[in-house]
Amino acid sequence: MATRQLDFTGKSGAVYRYMPLEEDRVSPMGGNYLYVRLAGAHVTVVYAGETENLYKGHRDRWEEAKSAFGATHVFTRLNVAGAVRRAEKADMVDEHMPAMNKGEVRAD
């Protein structure tokens, strides 16, 4: 994939660096992931997720993201601690309001 790493800012102002998913190099470690729609320089976060296993978890809603929301890429970020992953996801959802995250109940 020719897509570069991208920095995303959460509602808190924290900046998170995400890497483009490379299917042959997906870690089984915990982390956060984003389904995004790239159109030129415009980036839209379609879904923000977190999982204990990026290798499996990043696939959970990918087909829906592509077909219903026009997602074009998956970006991942290693993040082993569950509480940190959940806080990062909430921060991203609060800022980007991804269409697929609407209606989720916040844990905090």
Image: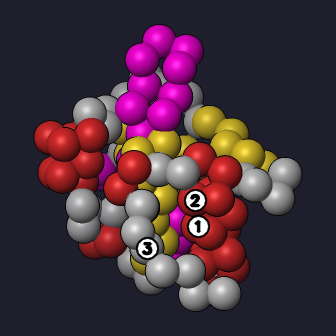
Magenta-colored span: 23-44
Nearer to us in this view, 74 or 87: 87
**Residue 36 in magenta?**
yes
| Residue at 35 percent of width and 56 percent of height | 100
Report the residue at 48% width, 34% height from top.
44
- Quadrant position of the N terminus in the picture: top left
Query: Considering only order in the chain, which callout, 2 or 3, is on the residue closer to the N terminus?
Result: 2
Q: Amino acid at mark 3?
A: Glu
Q: Position of residue 24 (x, y in %)?
A: 30, 51
Helix, strand or loop for disc 1: helix
Measured Cα–Cα span from mark 3 to mark 2: 10 Å
Residue on which the image places disc 1:
89
Q: Looking at the rendered structure, which numbered label has been put on residue 93?
A: 2
Rounded to the nearest angstrom, the CA distance separating label 3 from label 1 is 11 Å
Question: Does the residue at mark 2 contact the one at mark 1 (Cβ under 8 Å)?
Answer: yes
Indicate whether 67 appears above or below 40: below
Q: Which residue is mark 3?
A: 104
**Residue at the image position 42 percent from the left and 17 percent from the top:** 39
